[in-house]
Image (cartoon, rainbow, N blue to C red):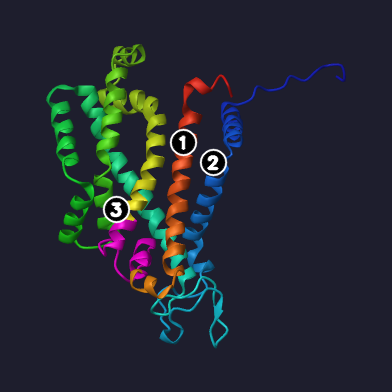
């Protein structure tokens, strides 16, 4: 038995892909920064109530506009200062991460779901179905999105659900156009013809044969769109049209800092602004890395 060499099992595809992902990430370096930042934001969103020093809506007018690292009479430390109502900025920042991630991911799920289905139907069936879906997309793109969002939120009212719905509807055209173009090129391929010859139903061909082959570019687009949705949520919250006032968000924190900037209370705008900037930048960097990682032309090099 000692002279028999044991055969090494072949490396699984999942392990091979993980090893390649780590290699591409370490080679690029910046994605590591993005993963660390997004991991911190995810932890803040998931464990905000545990990590927050105090209730984000608790007011203390005696300690309003306290400087960062200032301590109150009861020993409470405002690590990032307090706002004009004496609320702890750090606590509101941690709670705001939950809203930003929730709205970003949920809106992309809504918009991506609508756009993928619309693009698959448009590209596969063509004809009047294609014309109808694409003209609806052209009509939506003819309106400035931020004005369209303001109009809908004024009519429907503020709230996380309405905000997710509006931002999701604003994203579907991008997915529909990309999916339509890929579906047009795939519907005449040999493997699709083989599925038809084997008697697969139309839904099976669309969702089980064509869709898995176009997920890579959609993953990249989704990572970029999360960043744009977070910016849109911050802009709408800044205008007072996002979530209700009692829900802390990074955009509403920036809006509340407008009246205190002249008093040199810089921390009220800097900390939520930096949080938005780092989160959006990290999603964009991650999107660049995903584009390189999923590019089939780079597989032979890595």
**Residue 260 appears in which quarter of the rendering?**
bottom left
Report x, y in % for residue 281. 45, 47
| The disc label shown at residue 164, or none | 3
Percent across and percent down for residue 274 are 46, 58
What's the residue at 44%, 78% (across, down)? 65
248 in the magenta segment: yes
Q: Locate residue 226 relative to residue 30 in the image: left or right.
A: left
Residue at (43% x, 84% y) in the render: 60
For label 1, count other residues whose C-alpha is less than 10 Å away and answer few (under 14), some (14-19) or many (20+): some
- Circles 3 and 1, Cβ within 8 Å, touching? The answer is no
For the residues marked 2 and 1, what is the alpha-carbon distance in whole angstroms? 9 Å
Judging depth in this view, the residue of 179 and 124 nearest the camera is 179
Q: Name the residue under label 2.
A: 31
Label pair 2/1, CB-CB below 8 angstroms: yes
- According to the image, label 1 marks what residue? 288
Q: In this view, does 296 lie above or below 133?
A: above
Q: Is residue 198 left or right of residue 131?
A: right
Mark 3 / mark 2, whichever is N-terminal:
2
The answer to the question of whether label 3 and label 2 lie on touching residues, with beta carbons closer than 8 A, is no
Which marked residue is nearer to the observer: mark 3 or mark 1?
1
**Residue 88 covered by magenta stretch:** no
- Which stretch appears magenta? 234-257
Q: Determine the CA span between mark 3 and mark 2.
A: 27 Å
Label 2 sits on a secondary structure element that is: helix
Residue depth check, mark 3 versus mark 2: number of the one nearer the observer? 2
Q: What element carries label 3?
A: helix
């Amino acid at each position: 038995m000692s002279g028999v060499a044991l055969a090494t099992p072949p490396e699984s595809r999942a392990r091979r892909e993980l090893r390649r992902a780590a290699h591409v990430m370490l080679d690029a370096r910046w994605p590591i920064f993005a993963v660390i930042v997004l991991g911190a934001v995810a932890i803040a969103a998931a464990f905000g109530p545990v990590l927050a020093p105090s209730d984000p809506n608790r007011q203390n007018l005696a300690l309003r506009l306290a400087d960062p690292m200032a301590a109150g009479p009861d020993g409470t430390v405002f690590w990032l200062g307090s706002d004009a109502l004496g609320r702890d900025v750090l606590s509101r920042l941690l709670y705001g991460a939950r809203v930003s991630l929730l709205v970003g991911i949920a809106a992309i799920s809504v918009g991506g779901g609508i756009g993928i289905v619309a693009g698959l139907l448009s590209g596969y069936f063509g004809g009047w179905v294609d014309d109808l879906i694409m003209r609806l997309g052209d009509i939506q793109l003819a309106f400035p999105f931020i004005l369209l969002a303001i109009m809908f939120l004024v009519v429907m009212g503020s709230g996380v659900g309405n905000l997710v719905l509006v931002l999701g509807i604003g994203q579907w055209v991008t997915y529909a156009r990309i999916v339509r173009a890929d579906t047009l090129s795939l519907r005449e391929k040999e493997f699709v013809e083989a599925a038809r010859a084997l008697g697969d139903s139309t839904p099976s061909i669309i969702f089980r044969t064509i869709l898995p082959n176009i997920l890579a570019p959609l993953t990249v687009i989704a990572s970029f769109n999360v960043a744009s949705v977070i910016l849109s949520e911050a802009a709408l919250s800044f205008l007072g049209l996002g979530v209700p006032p009692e829900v802390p968000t990074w955009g509403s924190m920036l809006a509340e800092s407008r009246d205190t900037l002249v008093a040199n209370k810089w921390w009220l705008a800097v900390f939520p602004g930096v949080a938005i900037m780092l989160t959006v930048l990290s999603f964009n960097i991650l999107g660049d890395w995903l584009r390189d990682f999923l590019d089939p032309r780079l597989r032979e090099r890595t």
